Structure formats: structure tokens, C-alpha cells
Image (tube, rainbow, N blue to C red):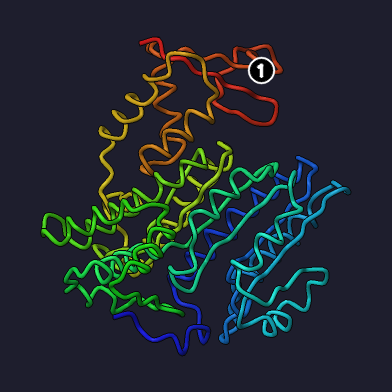
Amino acid sequence: MAKKNDDFFKEKKSWSEVKDSLLGNYLKPYLQKILHTRKSIVYVDYFAGKGAFEDGQPGSPLIALQTMQDCLNHTTMSDWHIEPYFIDLNYADDLKVNLKEYPGINIVSGKYEDEICTILEEKRGCNVFLYVDPYGIKALDCTLFDCFATHGFNSIELLINMNSFGFIREGCRVLGVNFDDNDIFEDLVEYDSTHLVADENSKLALNKIAGGDYWIRIIEAKRRNTITAYDAEAQFADEYCKRLRQGYSYVLNMPLRIKRGQVPKYRMIHATNHADGALLMVDNIFGRWELMKDIQTGGQIQIWEENVENEMIDEADVRQKIIAHISTFCTAARLNQVMANFYSTYGVICRTKTVKDVYRDLEKSGELVVLRRPSTTPKGRLATYFADEKGKQTILRWKG
């Protein structure tokens, strides 16, 4: 079973450092880019906790606020507006103490499901970033995420901490499937562990979390022993991301494993309708993956490169997937949209540089048509860049 949560905020765990690093290192380029829309930014931390750990390490609220302050200190724009909200039912008073150096923020005492719609109701036209780091799976509601996708924001991004293996555990409990893998949960620390019972209401609760009943098929396969608990977790994570893609164009996930070969402790899932945001997250995930590998190996150097699923990277296979994907674009499409679609389809299997290198080879061989605007450099030379930013535009079309 999962470990008790009495000391949850006593000290910051290594997996929490990776999780918060993923948030902080994404927020900086996100804010730098989104400030230029000149529309208000609304940042909401759903389950903010105390804001800091007792060992002095910053929690997600402090990391977010420090990042915001750093970005604002380095911008020349004067018409920016950021509204940070931090919601927590139990620790609003701690948040007020730990975040006292940041005036003008909004600390909300209550359940996020009771507060979030009220907060966002008047935010149409704004840029919204939601950090969803729940204490247990029962607080997640996929239908709310659907609602946000169509609410009329200028942009909307989600970063969700999903305890996918915890979901499989509860699915087995609700359907009466034997779950003899409890040793897997030995390292799993949950602040508010979910414990459902085998009844119809629990099924409905899991449907609400998952955004459908597809999870039942996965648990039934586990009952028949045609898949393992590890397989079930991976299938659920994949199906959950597919479900989110009904409302968000690009969905990525990063598993957090403390040990190689271990089931993910959590999965960090990023959802956005903007290709630029997806590609920023891809490179951010690879950056955090280096930190994750150091934790897994104790700092020892590996002689082979692995992807975020701890699978050895097969460069030939990756190249084949990149070519198979781009070959479906027989009509012109923007570079970043093509690349973001690739990662949303295949997962974070390589760096963005790898994809661009393959495109470059395909252009040289005449299989890929590349249109660049501007087509020449300031010195009048033929442009060779692969970029979709800062006055540069790259359009791709498969020629074959």
C-alpha cells in the first residue's frame, strides 16, 4: 500500500524536485512568449499545499511566483497583467505566511471544484495556465478540463500530475479484480489516498476521473491475466492522453520513475492547443529527464541513451517514425504544427533537434519541400533555417 502522508510536507522528495522543476522551467519561456499577446495571464495552482516544505525547499507556489517575478523584472513591457491564484482547502493560512513577500496574489481557502469555475468565469479572453497537482485521483474531473477547452480563453494550458497507477489500483478494487502488486506502492507517497469500494457509484466516480469507461476494458484484461499491472498503467496513461486530445490539440506526458524498471510514481501530463507550447514542453521534458536519470542511476554515467520511458533509443526506429509522420503531410503545413503533432502522436521519443535534422536530410534528398519566409538571410544568402518564430516561418510539404 501507499505510505502514510503524515510527513508529506516535512521534506521535499526527489521526485517532487523533478515535478516542480518541470513546472518552473516551462513557466519561464511560456511567460516570456505569452506576455507578448498583451492579454492578461491567469495562473491557478489547484492544490497549492503550504507553499513551502518544512526543510526550507520551495513548493510549487513559490517556484511559480519566483519565476513570474524574474520574467517581469526582465521585460520591457509595461502593460502586463498576471493574476496568480492558489487554492487549498487545508493550508490557506500557511500559504499566507509562506507567500507574504508577494502582495496582490489570490489565496483561496476551499475545494478547487467549488472555486475554480467561479474564478475562471470572468476570464474569457485571458491566457490561462492551470497547474493540477492533486493529493489523490478523486479530485480530478475530466469533464471540467473539457469545459475549460471551450470556455473562450485566449489560450489555455494544463499541467496535470496524474497518479495513473493509483487509478489502476482503484479500478481493480471497484471491479473486484485481484491486485497482488501492492509492493509496487511501497515508495508511493500520497497525501490523500483514494479508497473506493465495489459499487456503481465508484464506477461512476472513476468514469468522471478518466473521462469515460475505457478503463474497464483495461482492468478486465488484467483480470484475465492477458496484461500485467505495469501494462495496465501504460495503457491507461495512453488512453487518458487520447481522451484529453478531444479538447486539446497536443497532449504530452512524462513518467516519473525513481528507479529504472519501476512503474511510474506519477505522470506529468501537459495539454495545450498551441504548437509552440507543446514544443517548449518537449525540450523541457528532455531537460528534466536528465535530472530524473541522475536520480535513477545515482549519478552514474550510462553508455546508452534512453527516452523518458526508460527505453533504449533506437535512432533508426525514431528516424523511421519521423519520416512516416511527415509523409502524411501532402499539403503545406507550418513546421511547429507538424512537429507538435508528431510528439502528440508518438510521445517524447527524441529531442526537437533530432526531428529537424531528419527534415534537413529529407530536404536535401528532394523528398520534402520546404518554403521559408523570409527566403534569404539579411546578407542575401539562401536561408536554411527550420524555425517558426521571431519573424521566421517554415512551411513543409511532403513530395516523396
Residue at 70% of width from left, 44% of height from top?
Answer: 34
Q: Residue furthest left?
A: 225
Within the image, what quadrant is residue 184 found in?
Answer: bottom left
Within the image, what quadrant is residue 266 found in?
Answer: bottom left
| Residue position for label 1 | 377
Q: x, y percentage for residue 135?
A: 48, 74
Could you tell me the amino acid type at mark 1?
Answer: Thr
Seen in the picture, residue 241 relative to 289 is either above or below; the reply is above
Give the secondary structure at mark 1. Answer: loop
Within the image, what quadrant is residue 137 found in?
Answer: bottom left
Q: x, y percentage for residue 39?
A: 78, 44
- Position of residue 112 in the picture relative to residue 93 (left or right): left
Seen in the picture, residue 293 relative to 152 is either above or below; the reply is below
Seen in the picture, residue 106 relative to 151 is either above or below; the reply is below
Q: x, y percentage for residue 109?
A: 68, 77
In terms of depth relative to the viewer, which is nearer, 54 or 153?
153
Residue at 31% of width from left, 75% of height from top?
Answer: 197
Whether residue 21 appears in this view of the structure is yes
